[in-house]
Amino acid sequence: MKQKFRPKGSVIAALDIGTTKISCFIARMSDDEGGYEVVGVGHQASAGIKGGTVVDLEAAETAIRQTVHAAENMAAETMKGYPLRDVVINVPGIHAQSHHFSADIDVLGHEVTDQDIRRALARAQDQSLSPDRDMVHTIAAGYVIDGHAGVRDPRGMFGQSMQVDIHLVTGDSGALRNIATCIERSHLDIAAMCVSPYAAGLSSLVEDEMDLGCTVIDMGGGVTSMAVFQAGKMIYSDAIPVGGQHVTSDIARGLTTSIAQAERLKTLYGSAMGSTNDQNELIDVPQVGEDEHSSPNHVPRSLLIGIIQPRVEEIFELARARLQDSGLGPSTGRRVVLTGGASQLPGLRDLGQMVLDKQVRLGKPIRLTGVPESVTGPAFATTAGLLTYITERSDEMPTQVMIQAEPENLMQRIRLWLRENW
């Protein structure tokens, strides 16, 4: 049986720290089913973050504190004065790396138990730890018993030997410590970390997509990250340092307007695919540095789309190249689900299908109930998925593996504990 995570008290927060926005969902954990109910929501423009990396500790801390405070105010009645302590945070995909290991365990004819699996997972963690990387996920991706592959859950089965295929995700220690510092200065404890595209997939994929093979492409402001799911598990993750902000910057440069106006033009008139009417439709582009009330500067909408489309094509082509280089081949599936704020650009789905040569749909959180309509879109898929991760996949937390495995001696237990508890 999987052990359900229990926060300090009845509530836990999911905190998604992105390049363009920071969002927080506070959830009340239900005791019986291990589920949750969102009772508080807060989100605001990001500060102190660039390309998924903290560049200004003080600004990032202030933005995080204000976001969490807004969610706490909404959840005040539920929390009844109990201070929020535990948060589960996202790890930007740009700081994460996928590693694959196989661990062989002698079963010797007895029944396979949770302890056998944890031994294999702990062994893989011990092999992969390095001073500049912190463990984020330890995922048992598949099992082979006595040479028979395709075993989904070996618990209760009998055999002589078991091979466990393990997907480990590690994060850059320096980048994670900077994020952790911002959290801890806000008097919060990090209960778990989850790489962003994994969380986005957990919230937006249906079970068949997870089982048959599907790629999630999470398009954020500064980073586009990917996660490949198969047989219900994440088997690969990667990221490229390009996102929606780069599209906005291209517009600002190409049309000589301000960043704020470029974002407005992208939102109101932007599209990833052109149409025959774009040449005839004129849009007003305020020139950078000029008085907004001076004479209007009209340009055809086709000029705007001509700036957007090449950059979005580049993002998809880079993502396709990373997936091809992964060596997974058919495991990536024929299905792609787009999430993240930058995925909401009109025409993006059609362009994605052309470049990736796969079936593409727009994903949004499908397991959220009772939240405002404004936070149910693709931009909040990661935030919602963090709650799904902590309630349904907490056994993939490296600390849980380490605590529940039985190391061979006391020194090994102490060494594992020190490595995990940075």
Image (cartoon, helix red, strand yellow):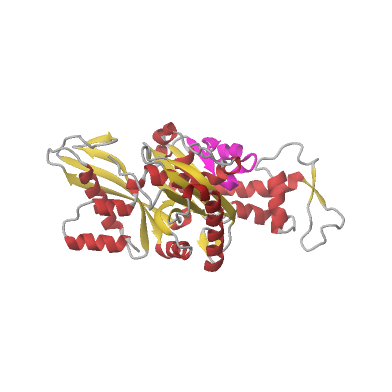
Instruction: Identify which residue, 214 or 316, lies in the foreground.
Output: 214
User: How far across and how far down the image is residue 38, in percent?
Assistant: 49, 43
From this viewpoint, is residue 178 visible?
Answer: yes
Q: Image height check: is 267 above or below 287?
A: above
Quarter of the N terminus within the rendering: top left
Residue 388 placement: quadrant: top left
The residue stretch that appears in magenta: 335-362
Residue 146 placement: quadrant: top left
User: How far across and how far down the image is residue 194, in percent?
Assistant: 42, 51
Q: Image height check: is 201 above or below 410?
A: above
Q: Image height check: is 160 above or below 246?
A: above
Q: Image height check: is 44 above or below 108?
A: below
Number of residue marks? 0
> Which residue shows up at 41% across the image and 45% down it?
389
Viewed as shown, does residue 264 lie left or right of 384? right
Viewed as shown, does residue 196 lie left or right of 300? left
> Which residue shows up at 29% across the image and 55% down it?
125
From this viewpoint, is residue 327 visible?
Answer: no
User: How far across and how far down the image is residue 33, in percent?
Assistant: 37, 37
> Which residue shows up at 29% across the image and 64% down it?
418
User: How far across and how far down the image is residue 160, in percent?
Assistant: 14, 39
